[in-house]
């Protein structure tokens, strides 16, 4: 910009100063909290320098992976996969009516408030804790794992579905209501077709997530590869554990790719 | 015209001291009284935000009134149970400015949605309409002027504006309505389609003696098609009469142009 | 829902055509449903998950729930330390991966990478970091460096780096080519394009995903204690292991309340950004 143009044009706007004392004070406080967190999380450079060599030592112990006893991995592998599929299927199915009940444009307040409260609890407790709870209640095995992941998926998917439904076009819902359709029919025909691609993509995301979590549910005795892994680690069979980790990485990668393809197919 | 009929037979729709206020202070509809006879082609007009759409949405209870009520065929909507209300709604067809078709559903499915009230639970859950519904849908699509059958199985969002409104009209027709509510049905269309759609609605209404309540901001078109024009201003009725009697003075009164002070005295 | 079907080649019309299309669509859905149900039923059979078993287990579930009440508020006295630790781990485990993931995404994204094989290598590394659950990382790291919050924080960092990195490079690849070209034409170098063209463009996405992972990591951090990686999880698991269910419910209650508050905060912040 040359001088002539600026002289004729509007005067330069007045920029407020970037560093006011107030902002600086906030920055200092935030940095303080952050530093405190780093210390609390034992993540100071000193700790890091001390810890990382040990991590490296363990990594060296983990290689090369051993395929000894790979035959014992088949059952937990399929178990993990099936826990993920079952929990996602059940969770996605249950979340449709629950999502309807949790949407404020579909249900009256005395329904959706309590439903959301319950969903908060479903979501607020981690899957592993749910699994721990159900292992205590119904015993070891894949079943408590399926229940735990189903509960968590219902919490997540219902919330996401209800948010999508609440964002859907009012006009379409109005048109359906005007035909004399009851509320759930309005939901089914006015809202669901529109949110369906989103619903499927959330469901696929949680399939990926559930399978990933299913690999560690075994830590609390809820079936799958986690049981094997826990066993290997406690026996210091790091090379066998590596094989399990590689299987997990491959399994999740394949599912991730599959989800991507499916999502594209639904557009 | 309306005064003559009012004495001789029962009115189709009675708007009885209808008041709607939001948050207790913003009054959208202010103590309106109207009586609409069977077969009337009624057009509501007035500046935007004056409560036309709000008034219309009370007729099928999409909006519930703060005070007063709507009476259809002598029955008060406010006294109805949910089931009766749904039944009543199924007899009132409605079309919209933005068509409000479900984009991701096929055209024929969209039309059949007009039969949702009669569809049983199992069929509703599995999206399977009956053979009879299919037959009616095709019939209604033809009556609405959509004859190309390959369009019936396309997704609704692939259609042009004029076609979409015809699908919406077919969805309304399949309800076999006694009353048609139309909310600015031609505002999103081009001039050629505007005339065709209004013509179509008028034709349908004449054939089965259907009552029409429509909001429209094209005054020339309103004069041409309506049997009765109701002008709203600030939630009150400012003009009510046949199309011919709508002169410039009346229009000014509704829109409060030039001599705004006159409004208060009438 | 009905797919677009080419009906021009079908020699039917009117109702017959409509019924034909309906049958066609229905058959398609029936096959799809049958496949899904077959997989699900086989999965249920394999994992021995059935309603009879669930029915048999349900009295135990109710009994266990009954033993959790009334809550015993004793753990509240010692909860603050582990709780703060949990939140600290999640904060560091969410913020530290941001620059690392950004740096790696710069090498992984097809629009910014220069060395093809290096990009692929970074992608494989990010994928490995992402697919291994944080609890598994924690377990491996605990056996490497011992108990404490350090392995927990590192586990969260590793998993989040993988997840965020993948998200970042996908977002970078989606950035409009025009912006990059405009920057290039001003003579900016690769790093300048990255900092002044790409990052400002994707900043809202970055913020949104970071908040999402903050939420996620807080939840994960509550269970890291299970394998000895610090936080409130240790308190919870030891309460359950010692059959102190009335104490466990108190800890759970605190976790749910804290996580709900964080969830709300993060959701509110995200809706302001988008």
Image (cartoon, coloured by chain):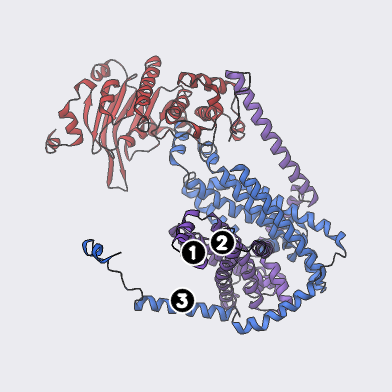
Give the label on residue A63, or none: none
Element class at badge 1: helix
Image colour assigned to chain B: red
Neighbour class for label 3 at 10 Å: few (<14), some, many (≥20)? few
Q: Nearer the viewer, mark 2 or mark 3?
A: 2
Residue B165 locus on image (x, y percent): 43, 28
Residue B153, above or below C198: above
Q: Colour of chain C?
A: purple
* Residue at the image point whose x is 71% and y is 67% from the top: C136
State the residue in front, C56 or C37: C37
Per the image, label 3 sits on a secondary structure element best described as helix
- Residue at label 3? A30
Q: Which chain is blue?
A: A
Disc 2 from disc 1: Cα separation = 9 Å
Q: Quadrant of residue B64?
A: top left
Estimate the spatial distance between the alpha carbons at disc 1 and disc 3, rounded to whole Å: 29 Å
Q: CA distance from mark 2 to mark 3?
A: 33 Å
Question: Compared with residue A195, is residue C19 higher up or lower down, i.e. above or below?
Answer: above
User: Tags 2 and 1 in contact by the CB under 8 Å rule?
Assistant: yes
Q: Which residue is mark 1?
A: C193
Q: Residue at x 30, y 21 (%)?
A: B225
Relative image position of residue B104 (x, y in whole percent): 53, 37
Q: Which residue is mark 2?
A: C112
In the foreground, B67 or A140:
A140
């Amino acid at each position: 910009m040359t001088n002539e143009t600026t002289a004729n044009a509007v005067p330069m706007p007045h920029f407020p100063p970037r560093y006011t004392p107030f902002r600086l004070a906030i920055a200092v406080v935030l940095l303080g909290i952050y530093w405190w967190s780093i210390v609390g999380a034992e993540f100071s450079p000193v700790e890091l320098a001390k810890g990382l060599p040990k991590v490296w030592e363990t990594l060296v112990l983990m290689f090369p992976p051993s395929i000894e006893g790979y035959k014992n991995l088949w059952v937990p592998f399929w178990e993990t996969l099936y826990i993920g599929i079952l929990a996602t299927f059940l969770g996605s199915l249950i979340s449709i009516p629950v999502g309807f009940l949790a949407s404020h444009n579909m249900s009256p307040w005395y329904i959706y408030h309590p439903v959301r409260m319950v969903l908060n609890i479903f979501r607020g407790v981690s899957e592993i804790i749910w699994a721990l709870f159900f292992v205590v209640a119904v015993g070891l095995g894949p079943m408590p794992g399926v229940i735990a992941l189903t509960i968590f998926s219902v919490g997540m998917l219902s919330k996401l579905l209800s948010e999508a439904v609440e964002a859907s076009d009012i006009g379409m819902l109005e048109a359906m209501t005007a035909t004399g359709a009851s509320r759930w029919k309005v939901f089914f025909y006015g809202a669901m077709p529109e949110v369906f691609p989103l619903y499927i993509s959330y469901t696929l995301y949680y399939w990926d997530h559930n399978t990933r979590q299913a690999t560690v549910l075994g830590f609390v005795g809820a079936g799958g590869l986690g049981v094997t892994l826990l066993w290997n680690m406690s026996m210091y069979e790091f090379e066998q554990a590596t094989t399990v980790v590689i299987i997990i990485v491959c399994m999740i990668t394949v599912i991730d790719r599959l989800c991507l393809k499916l999502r594209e197919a639904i557009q | 015209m309306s005064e003559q009929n009012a004495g001789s037979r029962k009115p189709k729709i009675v708007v009885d001291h209808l008041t709607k206020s939001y948050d207790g202070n913003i009054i959208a509809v202010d103590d309106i009284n109207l009586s609409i006879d069977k077969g009337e082609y009624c057009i509501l007009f007035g500046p935007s935000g004056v409560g036309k759409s709000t008034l219309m949405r009370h007729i099928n209870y999409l909006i519930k009134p703060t005070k007063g009520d709507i009476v259809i065929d002598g029955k008060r909507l406010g006294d109805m149970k949910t089931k009766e209300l749904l039944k009543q709604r199924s007899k009132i067809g409605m079309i919209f400015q933005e068509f409000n078709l479900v984009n991701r559903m096929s055209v024929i499915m969209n039309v059949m949605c007009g039969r949702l009230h009669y569809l049983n639970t199992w069929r509703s859950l599995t999206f399977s309409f009956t053979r009879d519904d299919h037959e009616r849908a095709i019939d209604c699509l033809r009556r609405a002027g959509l004859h190309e059958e390959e369009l019936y199985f396309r997704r609704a969002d692939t259609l042009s504006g004029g076609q979409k409104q015809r699908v919406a009209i077919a969805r309304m027709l399949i309800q076999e309505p006694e009353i048609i509510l139309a909310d600015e049905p031609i505002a999103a269309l081009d001039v050629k389609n505007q005339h065709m759609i209004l013509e179509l609605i008028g034709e349908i209404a004449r054939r089965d003696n259907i009552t029409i309540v429509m909001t429209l901001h094209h005054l020339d078109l309103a004069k041409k098609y309506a049997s009765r024009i109701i002008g709203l201003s600030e939630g009150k009725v400012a003009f009510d009469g046949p199309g011919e009697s709508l002169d410039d003075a009346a229009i000014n009164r509704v829109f409060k142009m030039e001599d705004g002070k006159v409004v208060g005295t009438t | 829902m009905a797919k677009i079907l080419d009906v021009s080649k079908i020699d039917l019309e009117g109702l017959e055509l409509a019924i034909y299309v309906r049958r066609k669509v229905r058959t398609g859905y029936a096959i799809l449903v049958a496949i899904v149900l077959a997989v699900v039923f086989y999965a249920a059979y394999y994992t021995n998950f059935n309603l009879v078993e669930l029915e048999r287990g349900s009295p135990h579930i109710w009994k266990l729930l009954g033993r959790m009440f009334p809550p015993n508020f004793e753990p509240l006295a010692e909860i603050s330390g582990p709780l703060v630790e949990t939140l600290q781990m999640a904060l560091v485990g969410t913020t530290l991966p941001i620059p690392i993931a950004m740096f790696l995404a710069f090498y992984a994204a097809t629009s910014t990478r220069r060395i093809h094989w290096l990009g692929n290598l970074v992608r494989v590394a990010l994928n490995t970091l992402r697919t291994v659950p944080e609890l598994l990382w924690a377990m491996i790291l605990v056996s490497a460096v011992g108990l404490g919050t350090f392995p927990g924080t590192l586990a969260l960092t590793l998993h989040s780096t993988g997840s965020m990195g993948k998200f970042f490079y996908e977002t970078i690849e989606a950035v409009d080519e025009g912006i990059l070209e405009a920057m290039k034409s001003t003579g900016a170098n690769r790093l300048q394009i990255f900092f002044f063209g790409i990052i400002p463009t994707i900043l809202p996405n970055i913020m949104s995903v970071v908040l999402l992972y903050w939420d996620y990591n807080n939840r994960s951090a509550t269970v890291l204690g299970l394998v000895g990686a610090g936080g409130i999880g240790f308190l919870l698991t030891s309460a359950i292991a010692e059959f102190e269910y009335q104490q466990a419910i108190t800890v759970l209650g605190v976790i749910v309340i804290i996580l709900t508050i964080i969830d709300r905060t993060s959701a509110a912040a995200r809706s302001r950004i988008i």
